[in-house]
Image: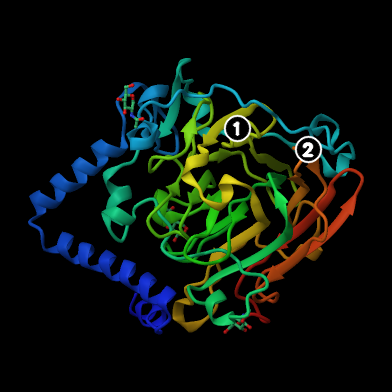
Amino acid sequence: MAATAAHVNTGMPTRALVALVFLLGLVSLSCAARLPLSKQKFEVQKHLKRLNKPAVKTIKSSDGDLIDCVHISHQPAFDHPFLKNHTIQMRPNYHPEGLYDESKVSTKPKQRTNPITQLWHVNGKCPEGTIPIRRTKQDDILRASSMKRYGRKKHRTIPLPRSADPDLINESGHQHAIAYVEGDKYYGAKATINVWEPKIQQPNEFSLSQLWILGGSFGEDLNSIEAGWQVSPDLYGDNNTRLFTYWTSDAYQATGCYNLLCSGFIQINSEIAMGASISPVSAFRNSQYDISILVWKDPKEGNWWMQFGNDYVLGYWPAFLFSYLGDSASMIEWGGEVVNSEPDGQHTSTQMGSGHFPEEGFSKSSYFRNIQIVDSSNNLKAPKGIGTFTEQSNCYDVQTGSNGDWGHYFYYGGPGRNANCP
Ligand SMILES: *[C@@H]1O[C@H](CO)[C@@H](O)[C@H](O)[C@H]1NC(C)=O
Ligand SMILES: *[C@@H]1O[C@H](CO)[C@@H](O)[C@H](O)[C@H]1NC(C)=O
Ligand SMILES: *[C@@H]1O[C@H](CO)[C@@H](O)[C@H](O)[C@H]1NC(C)=O
């Protein structure tokens, strides 16, 4: 923690603000620490009551999660003052058509992949008119650096492929292996990602694979919509691979959060819970399981929609949440990210993706396939001028390719610490 504080405190206005936010976090943490135990307990209970909405039914998942089926109009989004009179849109006005018919993809036996669902489905279903929400437990909040920071990213974590400030890239120990496009107006993105359960060395580290829909410059007002899978012991209290989303309209400062942990995203789907475990996951040299994620902008209402797999339209981020993304995205990124907290002064052995390097290929390495963008005519198109980026290719790497079945794809990831990444 001390290292982080020293690092952000280097004088630039950006960093000063980050430092301030960070210090406020510390202050609230130390206040919490000084509160009498009963008072702290009371505050945590109050926060839990705000987060967890009354459930019509609760489903217990074998991973220990409680999935609350909450009436659709009682979901966290409607705590937002701007959404008090909101009429829920039960379907998008427009659905972009793709280049690839998913049912026809992967005809080669060697590359057969399987669809997946969520672990809690084994134990029940949410009734119509409700949405499944992973219940936040007291321990979830107590693991966070402060109650206010629970469900939020600690640092700016956007990979900056062309940044002239390498110091910023390495600032918080976040490492990436990504493919990206920029320089056009984008109205969405899609990818099919195989799912793994990377090993995390330390609870304060994480490993994720996601797409980023980015608007604005990399300043204080960066807009971002993110979705994918993650393993994050800090956030969830275990090492399971979970479906997640994130959004921010001010570079991770005051707005946004993971999943439904703040007001913003409006969920309409009764079958998929954000933050819930994905099952099964891919096994090395064995069955491969992948998920498709599509995020696109409704040309009529301007809301950003998200679809999981071919069947599940999850819901939408209302247009008013964003500034730049109110118009369009200026950059799309796909790939992996881990935190390297340099335990023992060495590179972390936290894995990205499968923990294997891209050159090992199918069933060993992790992939994004059929990566596409939504263009200004609202059609899914192959991305043009794909770039790649990684901070230390000896730790985590990325390799792009294209063919008929998989369109544009890339393999990415790695083991972290190894002989070439000390
Ligand atoms: C919601 O609707 C009520 C009654 O029509 C109105 O008085 C109120 O200002 C509206 N609130 C918002 C935030 O639009
Ligand atoms: C990040 O830090 C590592 C280790 O200090 C260094 O090797 C690498 O070049 C840095 N990356 C960038 C993009 O500056
Ligand atoms: C998560 O994995 C780490 C190491 O891989 C292990 O030390 C830890 O006990 C695991 N945590 C849980 C909650 O299973």
Residue type pointed to by label 2? Asn
Q: Residue at x 53, y 54 (%)?
A: 223
- x, y percent for residue 228: 59, 47
Residue bearing mark 2: 379
The answer to which quarter of the image holds residue 262 is: top left
**Displayed-image quarter of ligand 2:** bottom right
Q: Position of residue 193 (x, y in %)?
A: 69, 47
For marks 1 and 2, give the CA distance. Answer: 27 Å
Q: Is mark 2 within 8 Å of ligand 1?
A: no
Residue drawn 74% across the image and 53% down it:
367
Neighbourhood count class around disc 1 (C-alpha, 10 Å): few under 14, some 14–19, many 20 upward: some
Instruction: Indicate the secondary structure of the residue bearing disc 1.
Output: strand
Vertical side of 165 occupied by 23: above or below: above
Who's the residue at 72% across and 45% down the image? 191
Of the residues shown, which amino acid type is indicated by label 1? Thr
Q: Position of residue 208 (x, y in %)?
A: 57, 55
Disc 1 versus disc 2: nearer the observer: 2
Identify the residue at the far top of this view.
128
> Residue 260 falls in which quadrant of the image?
top left
Which residue is pictured at 51% across the width and 61% down the height? 200
Tag 2, which secondary structure?
Answer: loop
From the image, tell me which residue sits under label 1.
117
Q: Is residue 146 left or right of residue 284?
A: left
Camera-side residue of 165 and 63: 165
Residue 116 location, x and y as percent?
A: 64, 34
Q: Nearer the viewer, residue 145 or 129?
A: 129
